[in-house]
Amino acid sequence: MPVNERIRTAREWIVRAGSITVLTGAGVSAESGVPTFRGAEGLWKKHRPEDLATPEAYARNRALVWEWYRWRQELVAATEPNAAHYALAAHASRGRSLTLITQNVDGHHERAGSRDVVELHGNLFRARCSSDGTLASLAEGPFTGIPVCPACGDAMRPDIVWFGESLPGDALQRAFLAAENAEVFVVVGTSAVVHPAASLPGVAASRGAKVIEVNIEETPVSEFAHCVISGTAAETLPLLFSHDEGSP
Ligand code: OAD
């Protein structure tokens, strides 16, 4: 089926659906200039996750881990949400039921205006006290140094889910519930290899949802998705979620 026809079909499903769930990955922010993890220029091609994104790495060298996250904060702070983020925010603002689940930690969905985003992997602009769990915003910068807990004075860690750690329970529960109850499930810009997030499209499909995938490459989801659209997020999402007056 030509890509235009696929987009038309997917759009029709989206327009008619009572409940839509969207799962995004690094690819949705690629056109903003935020690097992905596994592509040719991906972060995990240049850095070893075991040196930077595990509890053991943090215990070994807290300063190095923070240096890396400070660099990523600076990088993301210099970028803007793109047309894909805005299309999703605009759709929900029109009163349509849309649960947005993201694996991204860049905060671009919120910056584009999405509310109640289910953040599965944390947020780059938040620190968490390792001792008492206090959270602190790091959005204002400057993006240097190791933050100190305002409550107890201990060092804080990035509020990010590292390899080997569990995902936040409430976010995970909301994500699985939204996958189970979706009429349409849209997967955008994820290689779909990191679980449990990667299981969500399969859960939705097994409960009868129509699964739509938007990506520039094939992934494990492409094998069972009902509609696979080969295209970039910023080009495709405005077409899928556009609103024509008079449409159902
Ligand atoms: P990956 O880097 O694994 O995959 C990015 C996906 O986006 C690939 O499938 C690309 O083909 C696709 N892509 C790239 N540019 C795109 C574009 N402009 N439009 C649409 N698709 C595009 O990133 P994730 O799947 O998000 O975890 O990675 C999952 C998790 O692994 C991340 O959340 C991170 C990482 O380790 C943590 O940090 C906890």
Image (tube, rainbow, N blue to C red):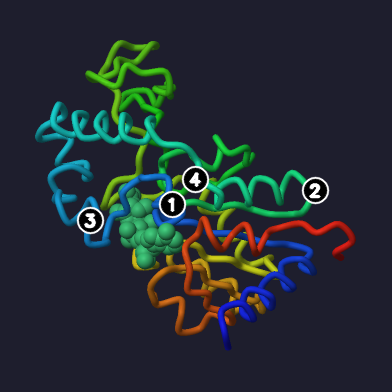
Disc 3 or 1, which lies upstream in sequence?
3
Say which quarter of the image contains residue 124: top left
Distance from label 1 to label 4 (Cα)? 6 Å
Asked which secondary structure carries label 4, the reply is strand
In the rendering, at what x and y percent does residue 15 appear?
A: 77, 66
Q: Circle 2 sits in a helix, a strand or a loop, which is it?
A: loop
Q: Which residue in the rendered view is the most extreme toward the right?
A: 246
According to the image, label 1 marks what residue? 103
Give yes or no for contact between labels 3 and 2 (Cβ–Cβ under 8 Å).
no
Q: From this viewpoint, is residue 158 visible?
A: yes
Cα–Cα span, label 3 and label 1:
19 Å
Q: CA distance from mark 3 to mark 2?
A: 38 Å
Q: Which residue is mark 2?
A: 95
Sequence-first disc among 1 and 4: 1
Check disc 4 and report the residue beneath it.
Answer: 119
What is the secondary structure assignment of the residue under circle 1? loop
Which quadrant holds the C terminus?
A: bottom right
Which residue corresponds to mark 3? 41
Q: Residue at x 29, y 46 (%)?
A: 162
Q: Nearer the viewer, residue 184 or 2?
A: 2
Residue 74 location (% of width, % of height): 31, 29
x then y, percent, for residue 152: 34, 12
**Tag 4: Cα neighbours inside 10 Å, few (<14), some, or many (≥20)?**
many
